[in-house]
Image (spheres, rainbow, N blue to C red):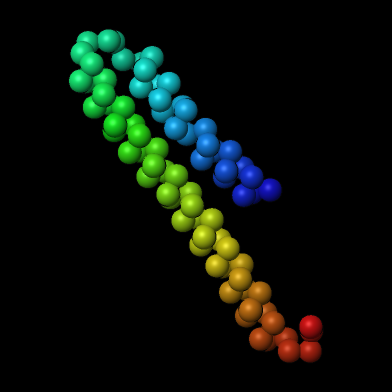
Amino acid sequence: MILKIIAFVAAAIPLFLFLRAMFNRRPTRINEGLTEFKKQANLAVSIFLFLIGCVVVFALGKLAWTWWTAALNPHIH
């Protein structure tokens, strides 16, 4: 369930940042808009990679916990 929530948030972040960059700024120059879009895209990618890192850490922690509890209780199989 938590992985589904993380995937949904990760998919929604670029859309949210794009819409915010397009509608929250006054149209002055195309270059400024492009620069802002690049910054927003970089932020979206960073957040996405952070979420992926959290999922990997969570999975490794769960794997380590399973291994550790199995090592402490060898009679449970």
Query: What is the count of numbered marks?
Result: 0
Q: Residue 44: give x, y in percent of width and height.
A: 40, 38
Q: Quick check: 3 above or below 13?
A: below
Q: Is residue 15 left or right of residue 29?
A: right
The image quadrant of residue 26 is top left
Which of these two is toward me, 32 or 24? 32
Q: Residue 1: give x, y in percent of width and height.
A: 68, 48
Q: Residue at x 57, y 43 (%)?
A: 7
Residue closest to the far bottom:
74
Q: Quick check: 33 above or below 26?
A: below
Q: Is residue 15 left or right of residue 36?
A: right
Q: Residue 20: give x, y in percent of width and height.
A: 40, 21
The image quadrant of residue 22 is top left
Residue closest to the far right:
76
Q: Residue at x 26, y 20 (%)?
A: 33
Q: Is residue 8 left or right of residue 49?
A: right
Q: Residue at x 67, y 86 (%)?
A: 72
Quarter containing the C terminus: bottom right
Q: Quick check: 30 above or below 55?
A: above
Q: Residue 64: give x, y in percent of width and height.
A: 58, 74
Residue closest to the far top:
27
Q: Residue at x 58, y 63 (%)?
A: 59
